């Protein structure tokens, strides 16, 4: 049985986790076998200061990748849903390395990342437009950060599209609309 890996990717506060939770509920209600990987740092004991350096961001990226493979190894799942993916962690790493003038050092890792993305059945990119940014104490307080990381998301998503990877834009003005759009994509409607 081929597992369908579906990544929910996009900037902070665009509805990924909320929509993912609703999708998990719906698929389980339909008796689908669902595995999932939630954000690999939120809700853990990991110190958030680990994100203050490129090495820490790489660690979180590879932790997330390990969590993906853990789900792939499970025998009891048909769907694996990812709240954030290696795309997300790589977008933030690119931003960090760009600020240090070291973006070109990521070329070998970028090749590895895009090879890993070939296993994704669908990449649901939650666009920033249409969603109000909610400051909740967890997300970065810097409004410019969201804009700056968005250009790295767009670079990565554009490259996914150019490589023929299955990218779907998730739009909507609220999470309910985004849920309806996402569930249709997942069910191939």
Image (spheres, rainbow, N blue to C red):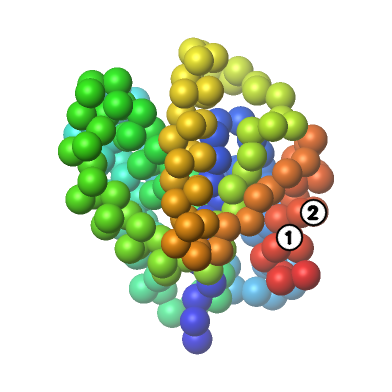
The quarter of the displayed image where residue 117 is located: bottom left
Q: Which residue lies under the disc numbered 1?
A: 183
46 or 144, which lies in front?
144
Task: Give how far across and how far down residue 70 sits, in percent.
Answer: 35, 64
SS type, badge 2: helix
Mark 1 neighbour density, 10 Å: few (under 14) some (14–19) many (20 or more): some
Residue 147 relative to residue 132: left or right: left
Task: Give how far across and how far down residue 158 sits, in percent.
Answer: 50, 48
Q: Residue reaching furthest bottom? A: 1
124 or 136, which lies in front?
124
Query: Is the C terminus in the top left, top right, bottom left or bottom right quadrant?
Result: bottom right
179 or 122, which lies in front?
122
Q: Which residue lies under the disc numbered 2?
A: 180
Circles 2, 1 touching at the beta carbon (< 8 Å):
yes
The answer to whether residue 132 of the structure is visible from this angle is: yes
Badge number at residue 125: none
The answer to whether residue 80 of the structure is visible from this angle is: no
Q: Report how many numbered discs are placed on residues in the image.
A: 2
């Amino acid at each position: 049985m081929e597992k369908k890996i579906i990544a929910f990717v996009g900037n902070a506060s665009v509805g990924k986790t909320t929509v993912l939770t609703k999708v998990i509920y719906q698929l389980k209600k339909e008796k689908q076998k669902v595995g999932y990987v939630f954000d690999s740092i939120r809700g853990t004991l990991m110190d958030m200061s680990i994100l203050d350096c490129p090495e820490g961001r790489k660690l979180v990226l590879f932790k997330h990748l390990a969590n993906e493979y853990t789900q792939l190894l499970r025998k009891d799942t048909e769907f694996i849903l990812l709240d954030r993916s290696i795309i997300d962690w790589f977008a933030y790493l690119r931003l960090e390395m760009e600020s240090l003038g070291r973006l070109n050092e990521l070329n070998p890792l970028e090749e590895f990342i895009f090879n890993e993305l070939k296993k994704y059945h669908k990449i649901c990119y939650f666009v920033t437009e249409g969603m109000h940014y909610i400051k909740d104490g967890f997300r970065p307080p810097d409004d410019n950060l969201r804009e700056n990381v968005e250009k790295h998301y767009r670079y990565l998503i554009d490259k996914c599209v150019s490589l023929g990877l299955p990218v779907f834009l998730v739009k909507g003005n609220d999470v309910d609309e985004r849920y309806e759009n996402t569930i249709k994509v997942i069910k191939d409607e």
